[in-house]
Every structure is written in C-alpha cells, then in structure tokens.
Amino acid sequence: MTYLGASLCCVGALAGLSSQKTSRLGNTLGMIGVSSGIVATLGLMDITPELAIQIAACMTGGGALGLAIAKKIEITDLPQLVAAFHSLVGMAAVLTCFATYIHDFPTFATDPAAMTVKTALFLGTFIGGVTFSGSLVAYGKLQGVLNSAPLLLPGRHALNSALMLGTVGAGAYYLMDPSQMAGLTSLGATAALSTVMGVTLTAAIGGADMPVVITVLNSYSGWALCAEGFMLNNN
C-alpha cells in the first residue's frame, strides 16, 4: 500500500511540475513519494543496526549538502544545478550496476532470472554513462565553462555509430561469457564507451538548447533507475 501511495505521489508530482502555478505542490508530492518509497524499501529489508546507521549517515550528509548548494543558487542558475545533479545520478547508476554485479555474481549460475538481471545491469551502465557525461557537458555549456557553440566533429555520425557498435559488442560478450572477469571487463568497456558517447552527442548541441537536453537526460536517468529497480528485485 505504501508503494502504491508513493507511486501516486510521483505521478502527481509530474502533473504538478507541468505548470508553474502548481510546481511547488509537484515538488512536495515528489519528495513525499520518493521518501515513502525509500522508507517502504528499507522496511522490507533485513538490515543490521550498523548498516542502518551507515544509510542514515549517507542520506543525512547528502541531503545537507544538497540543501546547502541549492540555497546558494540563484533561480536563473537552476538549469545548471539540475544538470550537475543529473550527472551524479548517472554516476550512481553506473557504480550501483558494478556493485550489484559483483554481489550477485555467485547466484548467476543457478538463478533462472540471471539473464534478466544481467541485461538490466548492462542497460543501467550504458544509460548511466551517457547521463553522467552528457549532464556534465550540459552544465559546462550553461555555466559558460565550455563554448556554447555546437561542437561539430568531422565524421561525428560515424564516430557515434562506432561507439554504439562497440557497446553492443561489449554487451554481447558480457551476456555470453559467464566468467566474472569477462563481465567486469565488458561493463567497464560499456561505461567508457557510453561516457564518450554522452560527450559527443551533447557537445554537438548548442547552449541555447541545453534545457531541452537536460530534460532528455533526465528521462534517461529515469530509465536507468527503472532498470536498477528490476535488478534489485524492487519491482
């Protein structure tokens, strides 16, 4: 029931954020929904007091840091702030995929859902890498750290195609070879290739269109989190 309430709050948040007049309500519903989902998930887990303290410390520290940063940001700089925070979401997705692969590897030989979990790990790594680097480029262009003009590299379409083919090849090798070293190597290659792809794709877009790019990257991070929800059996 808590999951249902959290889901409804998140849906309501999306509706609220579609209008400036209801954006405050949308933010409130989003915070309630996410917080409720976290509490429900932790309540279903058999965690030790030591682990609970670690989780609480990380959440408190992260929340305090985010609040301190947000209070110093002018309203006109919100797009840059969102882009910077999205890069952290992408990084977290990649690191979580690696950690989950190492943790769950001993069960892959006997788990009938192992292929589904491995596929979710691969997709989470790929999407997370694109989100991480793409968000950093968007932040740089909006903040004026990088040139806002589109970076139109010669043969960029061929380069992006090669990066995509390399990612597909790494994914195929990752799914076919059952060894742990092969899996970690393939995930590492996927993370590297997708990170480069995030740069090449985002850098080719002008600074004026970065808010749209941030919205797209936000949707990418959402898909990465969906993949991680399945691989963590939190579906």
Image (cartoon, rainbow, N blue to C red):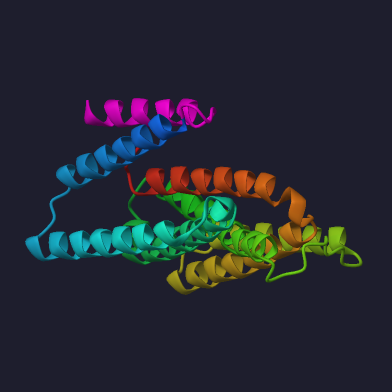
Q: Nearer the viewer, residue 102 or 5?
A: 5
The answer to whether residue 113 of the structure is visible from this angle is: no
Q: Quadrant of the N terminus?
A: top left
Magenta stretch in the rendered image: 1-22
Residue at point 48%, 63% (across, down):
91
Q: Nearer the viewer, residue 73 or 207?
A: 73
Q: Please state if 96 lies on the left or on the right of 149 as rendered.
A: left
Magenta-drawn stretch contains 11: yes
Q: Nearer the viewer, residue 80 or 50?
A: 80
Q: Position of residue 186 (x, y in %)?
A: 56, 67
Q: Is residue 165 above or below residue 20?
A: below
Q: Please state if 162 lies on the left or on the right of 61 as rendered.
A: right
Q: Position of residue 223 (x, y in %)?
A: 52, 43
Number of numbered tags placed on the structure image:
0
Q: Nearer the viewer, residue 133 or 189?
A: 133
Residue at point 77%, 62% (across, down):
148
Q: Main secondary structure of the magenta part?
A: helix
Residue at point 24%, 60% (across, down):
60
Q: Is residue 228 above or below residue 48?
A: above
Q: Position of residue 180 (x, y in %)?
A: 43, 70
Residue at point 41%, 34% (across, down):
24
Magenta-drawn stretch contains 175: no
Q: Position of residue 167 (x, y in %)?
A: 66, 61
The image quadrant of residue 197 is bottom right
The answer to whether residue 178 of the structure is visible from this angle is: yes
